Amino acid sequence: MNIAVNTRLLIQNRLEGIGWFTYESLKRITTQHPEHQFFFIFDRDYDPEFLFADNITPIIQYPHARHPVLYYAWFELFIPKLLERIKPDLFLSPDGFLSLKTPVKSMAVFHDLNFEHYPQDIPLWTRRFYRQYFPKYAAKAARIATVSEYSKADIVKQYKVPADKIDVVFDGANDAYHPLTKQEKLKVRAAYSNGLPYFIFIGSLHPRKNLVNLFRAFDLFKKSNPSDVKLLIVGARKWWTRDIDLAFNRMIYSDDVIFTGRLDIDELANVLGSAIALTYVSYFEGFGIPIVEAFRCDVPVITSNVTSMPEVAGDAAILVNPFDPESIAEALYKAYQYESIREELITRGRRRRDMFSWQQTADRLWESIEKAVKS
């Protein structure tokens, strides 16, 4: 088979959720299926690191598609011409965007439909584009893959897609995530929090990650439990909003919040592995990769009781109401105060972490690709 792949989110040192999905699944698929040819379509200069095997042909198709006008130009004007030249058996899009103007059979990976539920969290023109085109992409796709049973049900409900057209492939976690020794943890804490214990948040600083209520909850926790505990915030401020800024500036204990910015994966694994607990209290997620990463690091998890997060966490996390800062604060207290609770969560996380791996993701995605080609 000849498979063309939208790889515009493979950007060196800037991989996030969908980028990691693309990287980890395609790295395995291309190397495990040398009999097939893959055309990786980038929208900028690419790093040779992303050419995982000899059966990959890289193609750069400008312009950079990072704005609704450029989304349209890239997918509806340039990609159809490019696919006409390549003549692939399938166009695979790990970020969900398709071309409506190509006759080439297409497959999309929809990670979540957060823009349908919380459109106010996304810039006006971007959300208009998403809400106009993603229903059309769902109809156009020969097959859809998604990362949780929650997201599958959501796609069926929102876009009236037959359930048997959607495959759940789940996300995984990188092998860099592993438990640290006590000495390693002390070294990391010395570097990042002046040697003090900390809770950790990991992710893009986007409204749906619920930093507003996390900040409020941390204040409540510190007020009722005087301590030297810090809150480490790991991620880029690309989506930092006025509401997040206001919540932070109104904090009593804002001096105990540490912003690290984006970290490379090895350093990220270290700071996660040295935390008291992961605080991942988004109000909407299609999966929630940091939950599995924390399981692999033997770090307790505090996460939300909505959307996909209970599905991923199972019984291995303290589930909270993300809209209630007191619920989050109570979980922070439990995770900080009770070693027995931390140990029980770690034990349950060890049992659960093997349910999710990038190898399983790649295998399931390949099965979905074969179904799409044969459909």
Image (cartoon, rainbow, N blue to C red):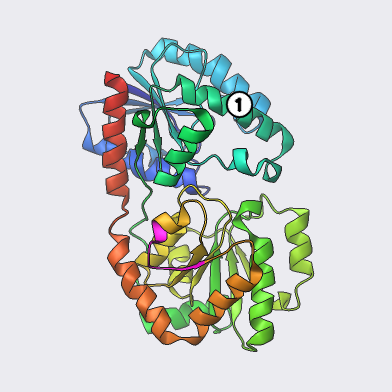
Residue 132 inside the magenta-drawn segment: no
Q: Is residue 185 left or right of residue 237?
A: left
Numbered disc total = 1
**Residue 61 visible in rendering:** no
Residue corresponding to mark 1: 71
What residue appears at the point 29 percent right and 56 percent down from the top-left corner? 355
Left or right relative to 123: residue 75: left
> Is 131 drawn above or below residue 323 in the view shown?
above
How far across and down, in percent of the image, does residue 147 sit?
41, 44
Image quadrant where residue 31 sits: top left
Q: Is residue 314 magenta?
A: yes
Q: Is residue 279 left or right of residue 174?
A: right
At horizontal 55% and vertical 28% (from top left) the residue drawn is 134
Residue appearing at x 47%, y 13% in the figure: 102
**Residue 181, how many percent across, how many down?**
35, 80
The secondary structure type at the circle numbered 1 is helix
Q: Nearer the viewer, residue 43 or 69?
A: 69
Amino acid type at image mark 1: Tyr
Residue pushed farthest bottom? 226
The C terminus is located in which quarter?
top left
Left or right: residue 187 versus residue 172 is right
Which residue occupies 41% across, 72% down?
299
Q: Position of residue 373 (x, y in %)?
A: 30, 21
The answer to which quarter of the image holds residue 3 is: top left
Quadrant of the image containing the N terminus = top left
Magenta residues, start to end: 312-319
Picture quadrant of residue 340: bottom left
Q: Residues within 10 Å of mark 1 (few under 14, many from 20)?
A: some
**Image location (x, y in percent) of residue 287:** 45, 50
